[in-house]
Image (cartoon, rainbow, N blue to C red):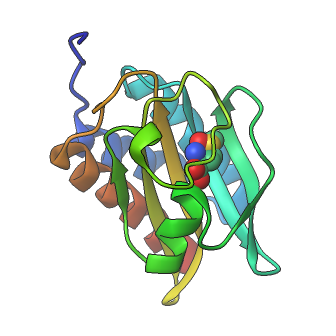
Amino acid sequence: MPIIKETNYNLLMKQLQSLIEDEQNLIAILSNTSALLNDNLDQINWVGFYLIDNDELILGPFQGHPACVHIAIGKGVCGTAVAENQTQLVKDVHAFPGHIACDANSKSEIVIPIHVNNDIIGVLDIDAPIKDRFTIEDQQGLENIVQVLEKQLTN
Ligand code: SME
């Protein structure tokens, strides 16, 4: 198991805040957020967004290899996060029933729903090339990052 460099989520929240505070455009905000996370999270191979469109998830801004475009609500880790309205912390993607393998390198994953005005608009999805990459501290830090996004998108 490689040593994973810890992320300073408090600093990252401040950086994200200043990066997006003057922006209203969803695509611009999510694009820069995916780039910021990619620069600051060790041992990941994909980070990005899926957005709800016509009752399914559609690929949004991301960093990483090309990925699946359509994910049905309730399918895969992303669709489950939406259906259950809950973060999915998956230590081993191969043990998750129905996991959708977009990148064969992915071994663990975290997916966090994003809410605007109480509706889920999509998810933040992060994949790692090692098992058990994300801790409960990562989950809390990333949920705080998503809250910064939600606040900006709700304004
Ligand atoms: N693994 C995801 C699909 C998206 S990729 O990881 C980028 C899932 O099971 O929903």
**Can residue 152 be seen here?**
no
Q: Where is residue 125 in the image (x, y as percent from the top left)?
A: 52, 49
Determine the residue located farthest toward the left in the rendered image.
137
**Can residue 18 be seen here?**
yes
Q: Name the residue nearer the viewer: 18 or 3.
A: 3
Left or right position of 88 against 7: right
Determine the residue located farthest toward the top in the rendered image.
2
Q: Where is residue 153 in the image (x, y as percent from the top left)?
A: 56, 72
- At 33% from the left and 28% from the top, the residue drawn is 131
Left or right position of 108 against 25: left
Quarter where residue 34 is shown: top right
- At 45% from the left and 26% from the top, the residue drawn is 44
Quarter where residue 129 is shown: top left
- At 81% from the left and 50% from the top, the residue drawn is 69
Determine the residue located farthest toward the bottom in the rendered image.
118
Q: Name the residue nearer the viewer: 131 or 126.
A: 131
Left or right position of 53 against 136: right
Q: Where is residue 124 in the image (x, y as percent from the top left)?
A: 52, 54
Left or right position of 133 against 71: left
- At 75% from the left and 52% from the top, the residue drawn is 59
Above or below, comparing residue 58 to residue 36 in the picture: below
Q: Name the residue nearer the viewer: 136 or 32.
A: 136
Q: Name the residue nearer the viewer: 60 or 100.
A: 100
Above or below, comparing residue 13 to residue 3 in the picture: below
Q: Where is residue 93 in the image (x, y as percent from the top left)?
A: 44, 40
